């Protein structure tokens, strides 16, 4: 029986690499509280597998099987479309985020890649289980979107303000979304540190090299921030 469950789970995870139409729940059968608890179980089982792999615990197979069973059940019930109540999420956005979450679960459980990579997959499930915080994060991303697309300027002073405002928007969002994800907090801290280091080359540049250094550095920083924005937009089905 265990082998059969694992085989089915593996086939479903393969479908996430080559998605096909899956089942979804209808409005009449959807219960939000139950859905939230299921989301939290998926996230918790991901954490348990991460810990068991990191510490090389003897119960790795038990936690691995728990996660695969829970994810298989979740996928069969909710499939590739947002459940009732999530009217602000498009089918394409839901499918994209859930597909990537499934891929992360598959890489964690079958390939046993660096466990911290799976932190990405826990965030959507934790947030879906907290509707108020979920909506606050989506509002923060919508606000950030208005800023991130601002065109580059030729002014060092204006660009410095733009960078600072983007970091502030990132901090606001991640303070809501990563309270239980220490590795995500560390990753973001490293990102901000690297941006500040990049900008220090501008502030320390000599006058005759300032324009060249500023242009190159501004492009690099904008690329980093836009990549991060895209990542968070995907995490919240936007």
Image (cartoon, helix red, strand yellow):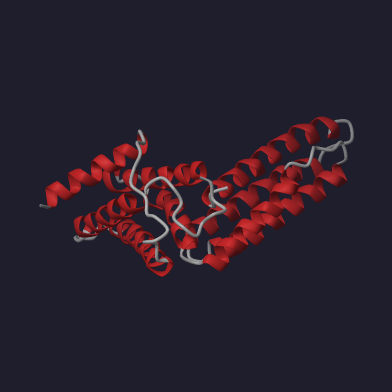
Q: Nearer the viewer, residue 51 or 138?
A: 138
Residue 7 in the figure: left or right of residue 194: left
Residue 118 in the image: above or below residue 29: above
Toward the front, the furthest residue is 28
Look at the image and tell me whether residue 181 can be seen: no
Q: Nearer the viewer, residue 181 or 37?
A: 37
Q: Nearer the viewer, residue 88 or 97?
A: 88
Q: Nearer the viewer, residue 162 or 55?
A: 162
| Point 65% across, 51% down: residue | 192
Residue 161 in the image: above or below residue 21: below
Classify residue 60 by image quadrant: bottom left
Residue 58 in the figure: left or right of residue 105: left
| Point 30% across, 37% down: residue | 14
| Point 74% across, 36% down: residue | 217
Look at the image and tell me whether residue 200 can be seen: yes
How far across and how far down the image is residue 220, in percent?
A: 69, 36
Toward the left, the furthest residue is 1
Classify residue 15 by image quadrant: top left
Residue 2 in the figure: left or right of residue 197: left
How far across and how far down the image is residue 121, in percent?
A: 43, 52
Label tally: 0
How far across and how far down the image is residue 165, in percent?
A: 76, 54
| Point 88% across, 31% down: residue | 208
How far across and how far down the image is residue 38, in percent?
A: 36, 63
């Amino acid at each position: 029986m265990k082998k059969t469950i694992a085989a089915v789970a593996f086939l479903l995870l393969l479908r996430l690499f080559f998605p096909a139409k899956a089942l979804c729940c209808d409005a009449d059968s959807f219960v939000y509280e139950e859905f939230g608890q299921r989301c939290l179980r998926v996230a918790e089982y991901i954490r348990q597998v991460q810990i068991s792999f990191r510490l090389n615990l003897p119960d790795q197979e038990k936690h691995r099987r728990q996660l695969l069973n829970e994810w298989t059940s979740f996928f069969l019930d909710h499939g590739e479309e947002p459940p009732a109540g999530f009217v602000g999420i498009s089918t394409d956005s839901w499918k994209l985020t859930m597909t990537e979450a499934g891929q992360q679960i598959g890489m964690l459980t079958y390939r046993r890649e660096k466990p911290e990579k799976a932190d990405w997959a826990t965030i959507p499930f934790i947030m879906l289980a907290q509707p108020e915080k979920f909506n606050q994060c989506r509002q923060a991303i919508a606000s950030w979107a208005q800023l991130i697309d601002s065109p580059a300027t030729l002014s060092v002073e204006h660009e410095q303000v733009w960078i600072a405002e983007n970091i502030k928007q990132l901090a606001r969002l991640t303070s809501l979304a990563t309270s239980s994800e220490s590795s995500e907090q560390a990753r973001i801290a490293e990102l901000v540190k690297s941006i500040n280091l990049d900008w220090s080359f501008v502030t320390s540049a000599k006058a005759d090299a300032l324009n060249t250094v500023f242009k190159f550095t501004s492009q690099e920083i904008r690329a980093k921030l836009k990549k991060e924005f895209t990542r968070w937009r995907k995490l919240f089905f936007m």
